[in-house]
């Protein structure tokens, strides 16, 4: 870890936005740039083709198996608290993922004494195929839920695209839609904005087969702050505490105020590092 990265993590000699921009790009190698060029060809091709075979609906399982006693108890608890049973409409992996997201949100709500006001307009940034839309619906009960994804036309090996899966995931959810858009150019206001594992360093972005032209966390978080209404909340989840600290330094520069962070030490399924949820307010 270089000196600037250490500053971002420890908070000592707090780096400027210019430092952070330099830090996040300083480790980009020639190989990374070549990979980025390859990813850009495929990304731009999918943007032109905009391939879709229509809504793709995964088959549900109705019951969950191979759970530990702790997992079973927690899922039962979440189902009772939020009045939802994801397994009735989703396959195993999608079901467990939604319970995992709901578990994190619920534990953060309790730890941060976070008041959840229903019937708010919510926008999710970087939704991929919006597989976790059901968890957001169960937790927030929004009046409108919009998922945005810059690479929504990405093709899977079965000939389906992300937008096909996304439409299937949201088909039965009320007031929910999915938009393929670069959020840096997205201009619709929201009362709550969520971002799950946003790219704040370039290596993960490349690992997800995206070009470096899409890497600009400063512009992304500035747009989030601009789209968030006064009194609104921004909910950010990062992969680790070190990543959360880098992200926090960038978000703070937008003028949003941090209301607390929660380290998810007891996830529903094991992780290499605990995820971190940070709650921000636009005053």
Image (spheres, grey):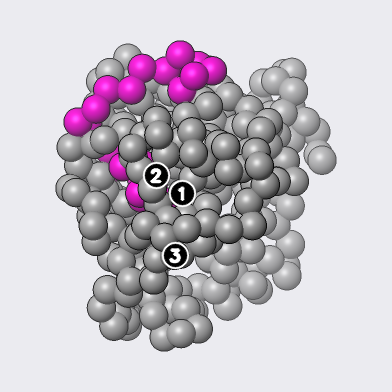
Is mark 2 in CB contact (under 8 Å) with mark 1? yes
The earlier-in-sequence mark between 2 and 1 is 1
Q: Tell me the residue at 46%/85% (across/down).
A: 158
Q: Nearer the viewer, residue 208 or 21?
A: 208
Secondary structure under badge 3? loop
Q: CA distance from mark 1 to mark 3?
A: 14 Å
| Residue of label 2 | 135
Q: Tell me the residue at 33%/37% (across/down).
A: 83
Determine the image quadrant of residue 141.
Answer: top left
Q: Quadrant of the N terminus?
A: top right
Q: Quadrant of the C terminus?
A: top left
Q: Nearer the viewer, residue 164 or 259?
A: 164
Could you say where residue 123 lies in the image, as x and y percent from the top left? 30, 42
Secondary structure under badge 1? helix
The earlier-in-sequence mark between 1 and 3 is 3
Q: CA distance from mark 2 to mark 1?
A: 5 Å
Q: Nearer the viewer, residue 91 or 261?
A: 91
Rate crowding at label 1 as few (under 14), some (14 to 19) or many (20 or more) other CA atoms within 10 Å: many
| Residue of label 1 | 98
Q: CA distance from mark 2 to mark 3?
A: 17 Å
| Residue of label 3 | 61
**Magenta residues, start to end:** 109-137
Q: Tell me the residue at 25%/44% (across/down).
A: 145
Could you say where residue 264 lies in the image, as x and y percent from the top left? 62, 31
Could you say where residue 213 lies in the image, as x and y percent from the top left? 49, 61
Closer mark to the observer between disc 2 and disc 3: 3
């Amino acid at each position: 870890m270089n000196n600037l990265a250490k500053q971002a993590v420890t908070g000592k000699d707090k780096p400027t936005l210019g430092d952070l921009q330099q830090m996040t790009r300083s480790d980009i190698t020639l190989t990374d740039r070549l990979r980025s060029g390859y990813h850009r060809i495929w990304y731009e091709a999918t943007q032109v083709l905009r391939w879709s075979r229509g809504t793709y609906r995964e088959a549900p399982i109705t019951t969950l198996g191979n759970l530990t006693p702790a997992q079973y108890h927690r899922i039962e608890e979440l189902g009772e608290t939020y009045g939802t049973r994801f397994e009735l409409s989703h396959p195993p992996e999608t079901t467990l993922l939604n319970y995992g997201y709901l578990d994190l949100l619920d534990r953060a709500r309790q730890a941060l004494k976070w008041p959840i006001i229903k019937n708010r307009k919510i926008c999710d940034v970087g939704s991929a195929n919006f597989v976790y839309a059901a968890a957001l619906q169960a937790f927030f009960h929004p009046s409108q839920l919009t998922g945005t994804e810059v690479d929504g036309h990405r093709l899977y090996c079965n000939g389906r695209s992300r937008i096909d899966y996304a439409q299937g995931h949201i088909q039965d959810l009320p007031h929910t839609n999915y938009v393929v858009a670069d959020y840096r150019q997205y201009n619709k206001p929201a009362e709550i904005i969520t971002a799950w594992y946003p790219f704040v360093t370039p290596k993960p972005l490349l690992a997800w087969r995206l070009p470096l032209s899409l890497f600009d966390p400063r512009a992304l978080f500035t747009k989030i702050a601009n789209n968030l209404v006064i009194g609104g909340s921004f909910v950010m989840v990062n992969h680790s505490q070190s990543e959360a600290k880098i992200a926090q330094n960038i978000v703070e520069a937008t003028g949003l105020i941090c209301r607390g962070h929660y380290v998810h030490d007891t996830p529903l399924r094991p992780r290499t590092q605990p995820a971190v949820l940070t709650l921000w307010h636009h005053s």
